[in-house]
Image (spheres, rainbow, N blue to C red):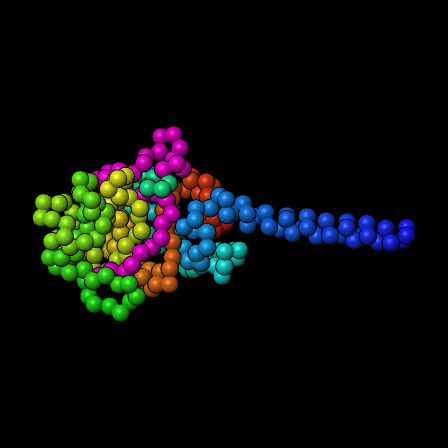
Amino acid sequence: RRATSAHAYSAMIATMRRLLVALILAMPVAAQAQTCPAVIDNVTRLALVTANNMQTSAARLVLYSRESRAAPWRRLGPAQAVRLGEYGMAWGAGFMQFAHRGEPVKHERDWRTPAGIYRIGAPFGFAPSKRAGYVRIRAGETFCVDDMKSPAYNTITTIARAGRHVSGERMRNFPEYRHGLFIDYPSNYSKPAGSCIFIHIWSAPGEATAGCIAMPERKVEALQNFAQDGAVLAVLPKQALDRFKGCLPHQVRR
């Protein structure tokens, strides 16, 4: 009986060790699930835009991919220059709680790009396209509402539906929208924190925007290809990267 008890005790100890190892191995994943915004938790493609501070319109874009949520991010090619809002960036809808003392938060017509992590939405442009979900920008029709008094605030609609007295962008009037991507930015009528946030062609090399992200035309088209199967956009000042530990590529913290 002593031999049997000793064997049972050894087996119990071995089982406890296996459970402890499994728990330790699971901890990084659990920590990530608790600290990473849901929008980035399971995505495999990331467009990361960083700037030296929140006051500059000069930024850089690097693309990353990974095989799965547990796999490391892999950089895809060199960084490219992009431009933000004329006054830089401000913490956007859903991410204002990450702002530290003195850092701006986004509001309508502040000429700042929202800082945060958001899904890249549908591609758009002037010409017809067979891209999935593509939105064709039509003259006299396609309209983005920036009127904080309108229930249609921060939506893409038509001039007829929005109403003639509602303010917004007649998108076909802007050559920069020949190619672009919508950003799923969750500002709305009840909590207006900026509207009509896109990725689009810059009007001139290095020209800042009113709050969007701008880059050369061929880069916008390449980004449409990259985001076709789903991707997330992160826009952050370098000093805020450590606020998202375990969520973003390690390389950007050097």
User: Residue 100 in magenta?
Assistant: yes
User: Residue 242 in magenta?
Assistant: no
Residue depicted at 38% across the width and 54% down the height? 232
**Depicted 3 relative to depicted 130: above or below:** above
Count of residue discs: 0
Magenta residues?
Answer: 96-125
Q: Which residue lies furthest to the bottom in this view?
A: 130
Residue depicted at 35% across the width and 53% down the height? 119
Residue 148 lies, in percent from the top left, at 20, 40
> Left or right: 145 with respect to 254?
left
Task: Please say whether residue 82 is visible from this viewpoint.
Answer: no
> Left or right: 52 with respect to 126?
right
Residue depicted at 46% across the width and 55% down the height? 42
Q: Determine the image quadrant of residue 53.
A: top left
Task: Please say whether residue 167 is visible from this viewpoint.
Answer: yes
Residue depicted at 44% across the width and 58% down the height? 44
Residue 132 lies, in percent from the top left, at 30, 66
In the foreground, 187 or 222: 187
